[in-house]
Amino acid sequence: MVRADLLSRARAGDGEAFRELAESHRRELQVHCYRMLGSFADAEDAVQETMLAAWQGIGGYTEDRATLRTWLYKIATNRCLNARRAASRRPAREWDMAQFQPPVPTPRDEAAWLQPFPDVFLEGAVDQPLGPEARYERSEAISLAFVAALQLLPPRQVAVLILRDVLGFHAVEVADMLDVTVPSVNSALKRARAGLQRRRQTAGHQPPPAAGSPAEEAIVGRFARAWESADLDALVALLTDDVFIAMPPEPFGYEGRDAVSRYWARQFGAGRRFDLVPTRANGQPAFGAYLRTPAGTRHAAGLYVLTLASDHISAITRFDPGVLPSFGLPRSLPPR
């Protein structure tokens, strides 16, 4: 009765009624747009466009065809498809590998526009009930590796895979959202699953410890202590043999313990030391890194997100300092 009244008032132009109906879905739509776009900033823009389009179209919405949530997902998905197509027209940056000192980074097929997603925005977003077709665990479906792999698939395949395998919508619902046939949805899903399987790492790593568990806290604490003291041996001992350091938007990184060790030796050279501020991104432990200066002020050097495999680190993704404000972290820290 209350919902019907809100919907009636929203259709009549009551903005407060519309906000009460739609705002409860904002967080989950933001996560959905992030999965499709791989960019926290672009996801925020897509959600804003979705809410505006929904407000403009609420007068013609009826519940006899789709729930309000499904209708909002349809709008958001198509906004993201438009954004993905526009992003594909961005000119690719040319990288001069000769500019890098040894060890020279390893070229990889990496997602150039990947950004981290602050865990604080996951609250209330990943608790929504999944549909019967969902195939992925919530934690896996927001991990950096999963989102990065999605960015390398064609836009339509990404949309279908997320709607079907992550959110669990039925094929007929997805067909309606994308204005295509059910066979077209099934075909795109088959190709998306195959493409995702090819692109995802298949090293057979053990699963990570549970978020916030003593096991996770132990390895994260060891990493932080070793990093802040520039203890290279202790850092390398935490890594898997095939560890990879990614550095979006650069489409390359450092692969294997030896390459990472030599890269870190250069990073900590000339007495460079860092302080770390803990946070979380994509359901994973992360740190804001701050370079100590002779004057005492500590300047932002980037955000590091750790991918754990049991009691080791299998991947580290470094993002530039521009992402720190999204995590509530400052550009610099005062002297200690």
Image (cartoon, helix red, strand yellow):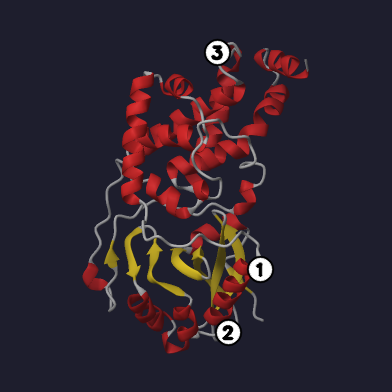
Q: Of the numbered discs in the image, which one, if any, rests on residue 13?
A: none
Mark 2 and mark 1 in contact (Cβ < 8 Å)? no
> Mark 2 is on which residue type?
Ala
Work out whether residue 202 or residue 118 is closer to the camera in this orientation and state it.
202
Q: Which is more foreground, mark 2 or mark 3?
A: 3
The answer to whether 6 appears left or right of 69 in the picture is right
**What is the distance, in whole Å, between disc 1 and disc 3 at their CAs?**
48 Å
What SS does tag 3 mark?
loop
Work out whether residue 303 or residue 330 is closer to the camera in this orientation and state it.
303
Residue 97 placement: quadrant: bottom left
Q: Earlier in the sequence, mark 1 or mark 2?
A: 1
Residue at the spot 38% in from the left edge and 80% down from the top edge? 261
Look at the picture and state if 157 lies above or below 95: above
Which residue lies under the disc numbered 3? 65
What SS does tag 1 mark?
helix
Look at the picture and state if 275 lies above or below 84: below
**What is the distance, in whole Å, between disc 1 and disc 2 at their CAs?**
37 Å
